[in-house]
Image (cartoon, coloured by chain):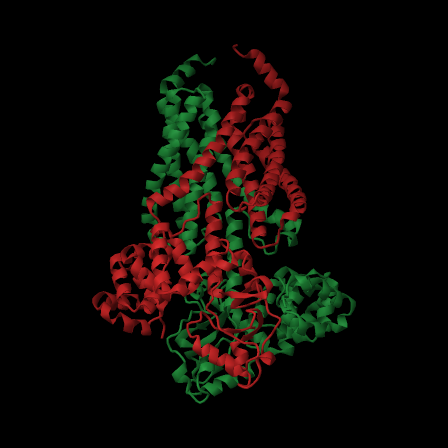
Chain colours: A red, B green
Amino acid sequence: MRVGHLIGPELREILRESPGDARAVLDEFHPEDVADVVAELPEVQAAELLARLPAVDAATIFERLEDHEQEAIVEELGPESTAHIAAEMAPDDRADLLETLDQETSDAVLATLEKIDPEAAEEVAEIDRWPPASAGRLMTPAYVSVAPTGTVEDAVRAIRENHEAETANYVYLVNEKDRLVGVVSIRELLLGAPSAPLSEVSTANFISVPPTMDQEEVARRMAKYDLTALPVVGDRGVFLGIITVDDVIDVLTEEQSEDVQKLGAVEPLEAPYFATSFRTFIKKRASWLLALFVGEFFTGTALRSYDSILNAVTTLAFYVPLLVSTGGNSGGQSSSLVIRGMATGDIRLADWRRVLARELAQGVTLGLFLAAVGMLRVMLWGDGPRFAVVIGVTLIGIVMMGCTVGSMLPFLLKRMRFDPATSSAPFIASLVDVLGIVIYFNVARVVLADVIAKAAEAAPR
Amino acid sequence: MRVGHLIGPELREILRESPGDARAVLDEFHPEDVADVVAELPEVQAAELLARLPAVDAATIFERLEDHEQEAIVEELGPESTAHIAAEMAPDDRADLLETLDQETSDAVLATLEKIDPEAAEEVAEIDRWPPASAGRLMTPAYVSVAPTGTVEDAVRAIRENHEAETANYVYLVNEKDRLVGVVSIRELLLGAPSAPLSEVSTANFISVPPTMDQEEVARRMAKYDLTALPVVGDRGVFLGIITVDDVIDVLTEEQSEDVQKLGAVEPLEAPYFATSFRTFIKKRASWLLALFVGEFFTGTALRSYDSILNAVTTLAFYVPLLVSTGGNSGGQSSSLVIRGMATGDIRLADWRRVLARELAQGVTLGLFLAAVGMLRVMLWGDGPRFAVVIGVTLIGIVMMGCTVGSMLPFLLKRMRFDPATSSAPFIASLVDVLGIVIYFNVARVVLADVIAKAAEAAPR
């Protein structure tokens, strides 16, 4: 039988018409599908439904909702009911929820949580210790562990007792000092004899990450070693928790959205397009648009300072957008190559010289190529061979400058501990545009020196 | 014990100094780490090492290398040795390899493969039937299956016998008509009694995908339902293969690189930055750069057509880059929001009206905001209140136009069955720049009508 969006209408009807039967529905459908339907209910109705379910079932649905959906429902639920549901959520999802909510609501939920389930509150504090976007924030303490001295049978019993453990594809061997000393997969347990000692079926040669590792690096590590769960190990080998592959996929998708939005000069949205309010859109867009706008004021200042040249040779004005945008395009290419290279780990900070050398070589080549095309266009427009020289020389200069600025600015930003994907594009745009104008008019000043001088003499003043 | 980059030097020494011991090394280190070291060896040495190993061990290393690394090593290995290694690779990796190689080499390898292992060649043909970037291309036939009438014990035996099956977290229940009728996780097998019938521990309510589904959609589906393997089911429920989570992570990372590069107007690279040759870079960049350059020619044409207005009010020229870039920035914001919304499934083709309405509302608001700032700047530059009106009105028009073009062009491209991420940015750039100039000079023509008329009279001609 195929589940998925097909069951939507049927499920919706049951939830709408007899929410009392909702509990029975949960056994029949995948919680993910139930969550989809709940997300589409009006908040009041969704809150009512969740409040009516046993907290453990409500949590299964609730933890699958998007951040902005959770926020809206919590407003209806109130901190009390939310805390009861939160207590039953997976620890990492619980920490996420409390981070999503505004400070006041989050504090209220946490206060109730401390009363009804101090251990759950403690788990949140444990996760919150770590820096944002780190392995520590992604991990969950919901794993299965056994003493390394046990047998396969002991491990199987541990799995049976921890049925809420997130994805139990591995059992972790933890010694009396809380250190992780081995990992055994369920598969190995299944194939081993029940009486076999764990030391025989487990491996001590496992991959682990520190809690401070960046989440993108965690995702890369997990993909590389084809793991479905990755243990997080702190100082002196103390086992802290595991990161599961589903969270890693979420991280990758989220980071991808952020990258695309940042490259488009929009502050990353927290919600899908249609779930984002008008106000949020304006807030996310206006600041960048303004920064870029103010940055571009300098193109006006630059042009004004070449006023006399522009008046002497008015044809120069016709080529300004063409030249300026070509600088921006070549710079944009270089920066997107470098930003992506940094994100995938191909390019490190120390590689800047190698990158610069490559980009300069490419800049000269691409510049020469565009210069040839541009000069042809000048001749066809009838602006003459000397003007063609101005455009040709300017194009070579501008493309080289674009490649240099576009490739080096991400290094500078990263060095200054900014995310190179943020802001590279906008900074590059303003800088490259202004520098392009400077190159253009200085080339014109030299190549067309006599024309400019003659025009200055003939000027009415 | 921690493995990873630490073991690099040690491992390299063993492989360099006594490649004869390489076999022993494989048991001690993770094949992924061995592959890292092999990737850094000169191709001749890497090929020599792989040829010397038993094919099954060579395949374990070889299938973990990047496409471009495989290509270089195959050149040294020759089609004969490559076919022996390919026969031992995972079927999906084998199909990938043959697709990576140039036609001639690929044919030669396949010819040998058909002789030494017809079944392996058949598996490749089976995968190649499906469209590029589809579920069919990602799947592997290396799964564990049992008859649905069996017991837990039968399933465990099947796992034991299929130890090379990719990631055996599930056992698939396939009936005599090759139909997939159930799925049971290893965890459920472990917790079930050996004599329990599979019908009791398995679920018939599993998630599957058709072989034609786009790989990005597969990734979304897998992430949503937190699966580590997803069965691919063809016509009439026939079980074709499984897609494992590690391949999905690779897909996500690859698509992300492509998106960022496309938004930067670079043809997606197939290899990491430093592994890409100068020639490839120029090829990937020149075509886009030229297309954008030629597109921008129209800004020159547009400006020329407003020659008389530009001569009458030379101040107009100073604002051209500022206005043109603001149109581009607002358009870039809208397009990146829409492109990403399409990629994550939030925005569908039918939503274009809703998106247009939202973007127009945002365009007016953002335009008014920038107009206020821009008019202030005009006054500070001393260009007077009437000029401020020109800039203000133009900015509102340009930002609205940018938001409209930027949000609608991805729909148009998608409708025409192009990838909206490709090419949106460059098309938008040229179109928005030209339209921006048209808006600017027409606003100026109306607001400054008397000034322009006076200047025309006073003109020397």
Q: Nearer the viewer, residue A376 or A428?
A: A428
Is there any visible trace of residue B255 in the rendered image? yes
Q: Nearer the viewer, residue A422 or B144?
A: A422
| Residue B370, position as x, y percentages in the image | 39, 33
Q: Quadrant of the N terminus of chain A?
A: bottom left
Q: Is residue A210 left or right of residue B85?
A: left
Q: What residue occupies the far bottom of the structure in this picture?
A: B195
Q: What residue occupies the far left of the structure in this picture?
A: A17
Is there any visible trace of residue B345 in the rendered image? no
| Residue B56, position as x, y percentages in the image | 65, 75
Residue under the point 41% across and 46% down = B409
Q: In this picture, is B357 found above or below A217?
A: above
Q: In this picture, is B461 found above or below B171?
A: above
Q: What residue occupies the far right of the structure in this picture?
A: B17
* Mark count: 0
| Residue B359, position as x, y percentages in the image | 35, 43
Q: Nearer the viewer, residue A125 or A459?
A: A125
| Residue B253, position as x, y percentages in the image | 53, 58
Q: Nearer the viewer, residue A183 or A293?
A: A183
Q: Is residue B8 left or right of residue B323?
A: right
Q: In this picture, is A50 found above or below A396?
A: below
Q: Is residue A79 left or right of residue A268?
A: left
Q: Quadrant of residue B19?
A: bottom right
